[in-house]
Image (cartoon, rainbow, N blue to C red):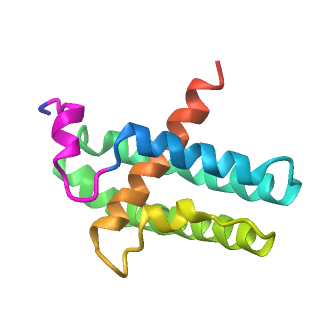
């Protein structure tokens, strides 16, 4: 496996720079506030983000056969992650919040690379939860 730098990642279509990820994450936390229903939806999203980031982080380490065996579950987890982001945004909008972060992440219907961007942000959510769990 060839290590890839952050700068190389930023050259990818619809990549998500750290400043933007932090901004979106902050917006989500501010909109959730102390709303217990929003917190529950965020927790569900975080659980899926942790599973997805584990699958994605290991992708480069797995053999071709392992990738073949895990590709379907990785795709299903990615689909679920997108659904969880959508559910949180929809709930927040119902509570009168803007949930502009969801639009900024983009929609795969508009460009297939937004799917990857949403996955990137799921990995960022897992990262933030990981470093805050110390």
Image vertical order of residue 52 relative to residue 108, above or below:
above
As drawn, the residue found furthest toward the bottom would be 109
- Tell me: residue 36, above or below residue 82: above
The residue lying at 81 percent from left, 69 percent from top is 95
In the rendered structure, which segment of residues is drawn in magenta? Answer: 3-15
Q: Quadrant of the N terminus?
A: top left
Towards the viewer: 95 or 43: 95
Residue 101 rendering spot, x and y as whole percentages: 54, 59
Figure quadrant of residue 83: bottom right
Residue located 36% across and 66% down the image: 115
Please indicate whether residue 118 sits to the left or right of residue 28 in the image: left
Snapshot quadrant of residue 58: top left
User: Which residue, as the protein is rendered here, is positioned at the far left?
Assistant: 2
Q: Residue at x 34, y 66 (%)?
A: 114
- Residue found at x 80% / y 48%: 33
**Residue 121: x, y in percent?**
45, 50
**Which of the pair 54/10 is nearer the observer?**
10
In the image, 71 versus 107, the foreground residue is 107
Left or right side of 14 for 108: right
Provide residue 41's location: percent of width, then percent of height: 73, 59
Q: Residue furthest top?
A: 134
Q: Nearer the viewer, residue 9 or 30?
A: 30
The chief SS type of the magenta part is: loop
In the rendered structure, the answer to whether residue 45 lies left or right of residue 40 reads left
**In magenta segment, residue 8:** yes
- Residue 132 painted magenta: no
Where is residue 9? Give x, y as percent: 21, 42
């Amino acid at each position: 496996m060839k290590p890839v730098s952050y700068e190389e990642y930023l050259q990818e279509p619809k990549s998500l720079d750290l400043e933007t990820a932090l901004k979106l994450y902050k917006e989500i936390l501010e909109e959730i506030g102390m709303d217990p229903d929003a917190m529950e939806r965020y927790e569900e999203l975080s659980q899926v983000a942790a599973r997805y980031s584990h699958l994605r982080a290991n992708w480069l380490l797995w053999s071709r056969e392992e990738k073949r065996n895990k590709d379907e579950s990785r795709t299903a987890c990615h689909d679920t992650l997108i659904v969880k982001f959508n559910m949180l945004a929809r709930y927040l909008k119902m509570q009168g919040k803007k949930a502009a972060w969801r639009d900024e992440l983009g929609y795969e219907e508009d460009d297939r690379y937004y799917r990857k961007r949403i996955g990137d942000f799921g990995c960022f959510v897992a990262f933030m939860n990981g470093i805050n769990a110390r």
